[in-house]
Image: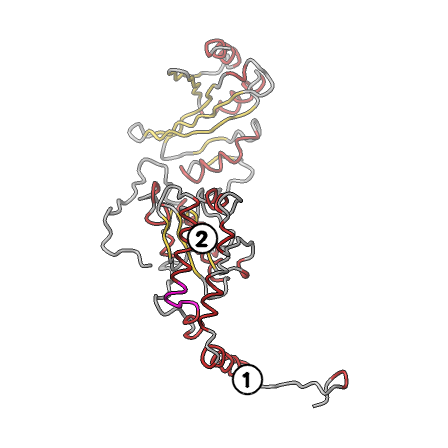
Amino acid sequence: MEGNGGNGGRVYVGNLDKSAKRAKQLVMGKLRMGKAVDWATAFSLWPVHLTTSCCGCEFAATWSPRFDAEQHGALPWVGARQTNMILIEGTVTKKMACAVRVTWEQMPSPKFAIAMGACAIDGGIFYNSYNIVRPWEIIPVDVYIPGCPPRPEAVARAIIELQRKIRKQRVASKWIEEGWRPDREYVKPKEDPCSWWRG
Amino acid sequence: MSLDQARRIVEEALSGIEYRVDEGKGFIEFIVAKENLVEAASRLKKAGFDHVKSLTVVDYKAEDKFKIVYHASSYLNEDLAKVIVGIGTEVPRSNPKVPTLVYVWRSVEFQEREVFEFFGIEFEDHPDLRLLLLAPQVAEKKPLRKDFIVKEEPIIRTKPPTG
């Protein structure tokens, strides 16, 4: 077909889903890029800026020059659509659960979650409160960090632990191959966290 | 200025209004009838108490009443800035309606909204009485009332969190 510019450019027309599937098979199968995908994902874990609670101060300290978590390839980023990690900082209130879930659904896969602080594990000082939810009821959590609040070193350790998990279990490449990560179930909140907002 | 001197100033300002004094170590509260609350508050403002530091509610379940206390102090008057006095009223638990003090002290607007969602106390003529912090299904339980009881969760979970 004659294209613009006179050099005989070509326009390919076809089924996009089919082409994407074939490209995936080529990259993951014949070219064996799976390891590279895992390696690249492990060293570009970008947490989204979603400060749910007070552990956000330690989150800030972790990326400050003294502790410098950017050396692990993690860079906090503002837009949910450009990130692949969510770091739940502390307790999640019922209203914040909606924001967490909406942010999680906006992020492109493969995506990972770290829950930080005692509140994120089982409520912490807000145990038995009427206004909290556990993060693992909202999104699938990979690594938990205990502490109230955890030290920045602990946060850096959690990032390294997540990197190890991704590279050893080959989570990212299998995720791309199979459409959802193979090692765990899809977490769907039992009740809609945004019901207060939808009315 | 000591609390005794502040007390004399407030008593002078409240002359003609019936009040009761609740007193303790380091604090003093003047409890007036619901109808006189706005009048008493505006007289306190004229006496120099130009803002409210906090608004608090005590739920006396056995006596079937709420005590609502506004803690007033001053920014502009340096003597009065050293003391905080409480001005408040009591309402029955069955009909918790209080006239708003937004038009006297502007700083109570958000605090009244917070009291509204946590205790279910309605402030009449409040310009913007909406929920402030809580989700509606939590706020309708009125969580800071004494008869709201949180269901106790077991310490040991039968099913551990996945992950």
Secondary-structure class at tag 2: strand
Q: Residue A171's spot in the image, x, y percent?
A: 40, 67
Chain containing mark 1? A
Mark closest to the chain's N terminus, 2 or 1: 1
Dot 1 corresponds to which residue? A15
Which segment is the magenta one? A166-172
- Give me the residue at 51% from left, 83% from top: A18
* Classed neighbour count for the residue bearing mark 1: other residues with Cα under 10 Å, few (<14), some (14–19), many (≥20): few
Q: Residue B129's spot in the image, x, y percent?
A: 51, 40
- Give me the residue at 49% from left, 34% from top: B111
Q: Are the residues tagged 2 and 1 within 8 Å (C-beta)?
A: no
* Classed neighbour count for the residue bearing mark 2: other residues with Cα under 10 Å, few (<14), some (14–19), many (≥20): many
The quadrant the C terminus of chain B occupies is bottom left
From this view, report whether residue A29 is shown above or below residue B60: below
Residue that lies at the very extreme toward the right in this rendered image: A6
Residue A169, magenta (yes or no): yes
Q: Is residue A52 left or right of residue A3?
A: left
Chain containing mark 2? A
Residue nearer the viewer, B125 or A67 = A67
Dot 2 corresponds to which residue? A87
Secondary-structure class at tag 1: loop
Secondary structure predominantly adopted by residues drawn in magenta: helix
Q: Residue A19's spot in the image, x, y percent?
A: 53, 82
From this view, report whether residue B11 is shown above or below residue A7: above
> In which image quadrant can residue A113 be found?
bottom left
Circle 2 or circle 1, nearest the eye: 2
Q: Residue B49's spot in the image, x, y percent?
A: 55, 19
Residue A69, magenta (yes or no): no
> What residue type is disc 2 on?
Leu
Q: Is residue B113 left or right of residue B149?
A: right
Q: CA distance from mark 2 to mark 1?
A: 38 Å
Residue nearer the viewer, B81 or B120 = B81
